[in-house]
Image: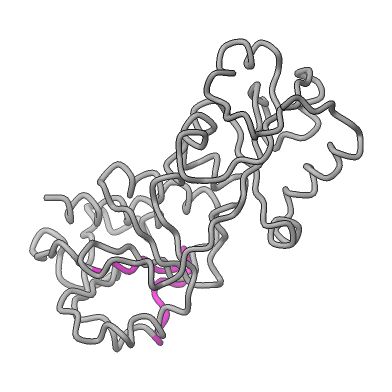
């Protein structure tokens, strides 16, 4: 279904760069060919697609008939893109609404305590997808996964990894009998000497402050990634999460 582009439409799309408008409209932006092809074959509902005629000539067969298509020029796309070098396509999708009841207690779970950097969250989602981990629980204060920079960093992995936002302490209080709740700390048992289970819960703390003290009572294994050189203060949160996920996969 072809829809002509208008200035008013462009203005509405640009508003979705802001969190409050994404939440108000229940919509988010996806950019780039790889991410959009993943989006189109996923269970997400795509409502609109904006692309150059060159892109549409190559990929129109992936687009469902009910999706509104707006052809546009590279210059018009640049006006609505967040990328320094815009790609040839941008899509609008409906926000999913997963809840804690959708989390599978028999599968591994990554818990993110106040992760604020969009790139870190996007990288964690992409890494989780690489290691076959399909669920993440994030604190309400964490950056939302529909942030355009997060979506861009996932490279399409957001379509396969469920991200649920909920008070972490409330969730863990219902899982107090879980034998493998692992927290990433600067001190603790070296990760090489730690045994992970198939359904371990791994908690990654805030980039600057680590794991909140309110979560300490729920953690039964404090685990550290030993530093080769003590001059380095700490690991990036997404890198630490990747190492923990690799250990979990062994």
Expressed as whole percent of the image width and height from the top left, the position of residue 192 reads 11, 58
> Is 175 on the left or on the right of 15, as rendered?
left
The range drawn in magenta is 201-214
In terms of image quadrants, where is residue 102?
bottom left
Tell how many labels: 0
Task: Name the foreground residue: 16 vs 4.
Answer: 4
Expressed as whole percent of the image width and height from the top left, the position of residue 82 reads 70, 37
Q: Identify the residue at the far right of this view.
A: 7
Look at the picture and state if 49 lies above or below 149.
above
Task: Name the foreground residue: 14 vs 116.
Answer: 14
> Is 170 on the left or on the right of 109, as rendered?
right
Image point (57%, 45%), residue name: 45
Q: Is 239 in the magenta?
A: no
Look at the picture and state if 205 lies above or below 146.
below
Task: Name the foreground residue: 173 vs 182.
Answer: 173
Image point (69%, 61%), residue name: 23
Image point (23%, 75%), residue name: 181
Expressed as whole percent of the image width and height from the top left, the position of residue 62 reads 52, 24
Image point (69%, 23%), residue name: 51
Expressed as whole percent of the image width and height from the top left, the position of residue 1 reads 72, 27
Look at the picture and state if 232 lies above or below 156.
below
> Is 152 on the left or on the right of 69, as rendered?
left
């Amino acid at each position: 279904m072809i829809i002509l582009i208008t200035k008013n439409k462009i203005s509405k799309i640009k508003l979705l760069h802001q969190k409050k408008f994404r939440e108000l409209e229940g919509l988010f932006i996806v950019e780039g060919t790889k991410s959009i092809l993943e989006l189109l074959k996923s269970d997400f509902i795509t409502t609109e697609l904006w692309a150059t005629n060159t892109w549409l000539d190559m990929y129109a067969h992936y687009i469902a008939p009910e999706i509104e298509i707006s052809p546009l020029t590279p210059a018009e796309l640049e006006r609505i893109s967040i990328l320094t070098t815009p790609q040839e396509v941008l899509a609008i999708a409906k926000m999913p609404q997963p809840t804690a009841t959708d989390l599978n207690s028999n599968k591994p779970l990554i818990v993110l305590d106040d992760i604020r950097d969009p790139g870190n969250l996007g990288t964690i989602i992409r890494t989780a997808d690489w290691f076959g981990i399909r669920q993440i629980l994030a604190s309400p204060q964490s950056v939302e996964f529909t942030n355009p920079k997060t979506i861009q960093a996932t490279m399409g992995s957001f379509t396969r990894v469920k991200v649920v936002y909920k008070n972490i302490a409330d969730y863990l209080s219902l899982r107090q009998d879980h034998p493998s709740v692992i927290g990433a700390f600067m001190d603790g048992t070296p990760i090489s000497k730690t045994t992970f289970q198939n359904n371990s819960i791994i908690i990654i703390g805030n980039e600057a402050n680590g794991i909140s003290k309110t979560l300490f009572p729920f953690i039964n294994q404090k685990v550290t990634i030993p530093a080769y050189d003590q001059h380095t203060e700490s690991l990036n949160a997404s890198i630490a999460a990747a190492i923990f996920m690799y250990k979990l996969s062994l």
